Amino acid sequence: ELKVEQNPLFLSMQEGKNYTIYCNYSTTSDRLYWYRQDPGKSLESLFVLLSNGAVKQEGRLMASLDTKARLSTLHITAAVHDLSATYFCAVEFPPNTGNQFYFGTGTSLTVIP
Amino acid sequence: KAGVTQTPRYLIKTRGQQVTLSCSPISGHRSVSWYQQTPGQGLQFLFEYFSETQRNKGNFPGRFSGRQFSNSRSEMNVSTLELGDSALYLCASSLVDGLLGYTFGSGTRLTVV
């Protein structure tokens, strides 16, 4: 059974601090996606990582992918309150078909002023 | 550019009834996927359509069905509703098999009473 595990599940951090969210998955896949969800809202695409070693950055967020380790990270730099949300990683399966995602459990991030 | 449009936004149904949800993808997107989101099970894949063909189906009972029309619009149907079907149903569309990611709609929140 394909598993996608995120940790931590809950993260409370102070503004200005750095932290990393981890996403481990159990299948072979070259594609990994990160999404953000605000309460009561839909999913907003953050990053699409399409190959081993891919690194993408947008503002205070940076995502990376290590397909050999089956690990992706979402690094938060100098957190601000606006980053408070739930973050999901998703792995595509069957691989490289874009057919369906298996989502992680989500990491609920709260940034405290 | 219009996003993914889901209708209705909210729905309340009684156990045993059936329901049809609609999704209009971004213009030009031919792949449409459906997901169910609940607090207990998280985000789970229902099915994916491409050019009117169901390419993949998740692990849901046969009460859940869908279809895609020639204009790429998609509908999903749930028959004989159960209390456990209460969830946020999200539709996502993609241009080319997820290479550019999937764009999610705002969702339909279904409550079964």
Image: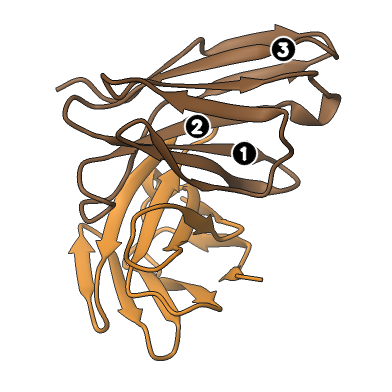
Query: What is the three-letter code of the residue carrying label 2?
Result: Leu
Q: Are marks 1 and 3 on the same chain?
A: yes
Chain B as rendered: colour: brown
Q: What's the chain of the residue with tag 1?
A: B
Residue denoted by label 3:
B18
Tell me the distance, in whole angstroms, between the alpha carbons under discs 2 and 1. 7 Å
Query: What is the three-letter code of the residue carrying label 1?
Result: Gln
Residue A75 is situated, as x and y percent measured from the top left of the image, at: 36, 71
Q: Is residue B98 left or right of residue B60?
A: left
Residue denoted by label 2:
B90
Q: Which chain is orange?
A: A
Residue denoted by label 1:
B37
Tell me the distance, in whole angstroms, between the alpha carbons under discs 1 and 3. 19 Å
- Residue at screen point 50% across, 32% down: B90
What mark, if any, has residue A92 been given in the picture? none
Dot 2 surroundings within 10 Å: few (below 14), some, or many (20 or more)? many
Q: Is residue A85 left or right of residue A47?
A: right
